Image (cartoon, helix red, strand yellow):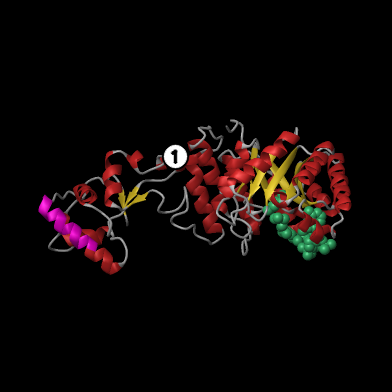
Amino acid sequence: MIPPQISINDTTLRDGEQAAGVVFNLEEKVAIAKFLDAIGVQELEVGIPAIGQDEAKAIRAIADLDLNAHILGWNRAVFSDIQASIHCGLKRIHISIPVSDMQIQVKFQGRWLRMLEQLRDTITFARDHGLDVSVGGEDSSRADPTFLIDVAQYAQEWGAFRFRFCDTVGILDPFTTYQQVQALVAALEIPVEMHTHNDLGLATANALAGLRAGATSVNTTVNGLGERAGNAALEEVVMALKQIYGLKPSIQTQHLSELSRLIAQTVHCPVPPWKAIVGKNTFAHESGIHAHGILQDPRTYEAFDPQEVGRQRRFVVGKHSGRRLLNQVLQDYGLQLDAIDSQSLLNAVRDRSTQLKRSLTVDELLALVTPEGTRTALGETNNISFQLNP
Ligand SMILES: CC(=O)SCCNC(=O)CCNC(=O)[C@H](O)C(C)(C)COP(=O)(O)OP(=O)(O)OC[C@H]1O[C@@H](n2cnc3c(N)ncnc32)[C@H](O)[C@@H]1OP(=O)(O)O
Ligand SMILES: O=C(O)CCC(=O)C(=O)O
């Protein structure tokens, strides 16, 4: 099973920002780092000092906050990158190195020995400057497994405190991830971190498979933001660890929705309504059979209580609704219908919803009930025990 001490290393501010078209300014980076820290994320990969002065300034500003979370800067195995990290006042850095033949060909013209020497020298340089160094195997999932282990063992020998297994282009499934990570974990004394991409929609599943195989740290991003199809989503990984494996996350999950909104607004990119955990529809119920169940026991159609992630259950009246939901909604508005009336209202709701090609608002529903066709005709409403579409 998964050990209780899983560490989340959120990379929204590094890999998240690599999503095409996304830029965080200094104030935004600081605000996001503070939020992640305040809700209990243990480690933050906050950017790439080598990008330039503005990025370095933002990283330094975060490092100066003296947050509880460990702050990490991302680097190539290049001296000037490490120097830029040192100038940011970082105590912990990550050095990335390509490990698949294809990547080594493109980045080191196939000279793998040169690549290893560069890794050794940059780790040593960073360690000599008092930095803790994590090492990442870029494209680990397509690397020769023996070579991957060799590189990771060298990184360990040269002083890395952790090795990151990267499914850089998101091509693994959970079964293969498990096998590859299990072999890596068995060959190392230092911890392994998972870094998974969502090109085939498997980033979260693969991250969890890696944790089951013995990795103890995981890279995440809020809303799954990141390069191409993105990364394993923070909210998904945390809630899966909690719900599936019964772990008590150090992260205050009730703030995950607010965090998701903050990121969506900052990057001007709304999350899809069906996005797990944080999407608008993830606790919305329209279908008659579902609402019938939920109204008696929410566990019938909810994986967990929406309040756990700072959400509220929401009912929607539309084409798929049934009488039980309609009656409940009307009751909350101080109205009662007999069986015949509720069937005719249901028929009217279906017709209207089909015409509009969407669910109905409260006003549209109530307009179908009262002869006057207005909400005010109903007088004062009772306390509404749940939200209907506004
Ligand atoms: C899988 C990942 O997410 S890796 C992280 C990707 N993120 C980014 O690229 C965002 C930040 N990047 C940047 O700002 C720029 O690319 C910089 C500052 C790092 C480098 O810029 P430039 O000097 O203009 O180089 P450019 O981006 O064109 O090419 C990358 C260079 O880094 C080299 N490189 C790539 N990865 C590594 C590595 N892990 N270690 C050492 N060198 C590397 C490439 O071989 C290439 O070298 P070359 O210029 O000698 O051919
Ligand atoms: O940290 C690394 O080594 C590379 C991380 C990364 O972004 C990736 O492999 O997709």
Residue 272 image point, x, y percent: 47, 58
* 240 over 339 or under it: above or below: above
Q: Which quadrant of the view contains residue 192?
A: top right
Residue 201 belongs to magenta span: no
Majority SS type along the magenta span = helix
Q: Residue at x 47, y 50 (%)?
A: 278
Magenta span includes 349: yes
Along the viewing direction, whichever of 16 and 240 lies nearer the viewer: 240
Residue 200 in the image, given as x and y percentages of width and height: 57, 56
Q: What residue type is labelled 1?
A: Glu
Badge 1 crowding class, 10 Å Cα cut-off, few under 14, some 14 to 19, many 20 or more, is some
Say whether residue 8 is visible. no
The correct choice, above or below, for 257 with respect to 107 in the image is above
Q: Name the residue under label 1.
A: 308
SS type, badge 1: helix
Q: In this view, does 197 lie to the left or right of 350?
A: right
- Ligand 1 is located in which of the four quadrants? bottom right
Q: In which quarter of the image is the C terminus?
A: bottom left
**Residue 311 seen in render:** yes
Task: Please give the name of the residue rendered at 85% of the width and 41% of the height, measured from the top-left corner.
Answer: 129
x and y percent of residue 193 in the render? 68, 41
For image coordinates 56% across by 59% down, the residue present is 267
Instruction: Note whether ligand 2 is within 8 Å of mark 1.
Output: no
Q: Name the image quarter holding the N terminus.
A: top right
User: Which one is nearer the viewer's eye here, 111 or 117?
Assistant: 111
The segment highlighted magenta reads 338-350
Query: In this image, 68 relative to 289: left or right?
Result: right
- Residue lying farthest to the top in this orientation: 4
Numbered-mark total? 1
Q: Which residue lies furthest to the bottom in this view?
A: 355
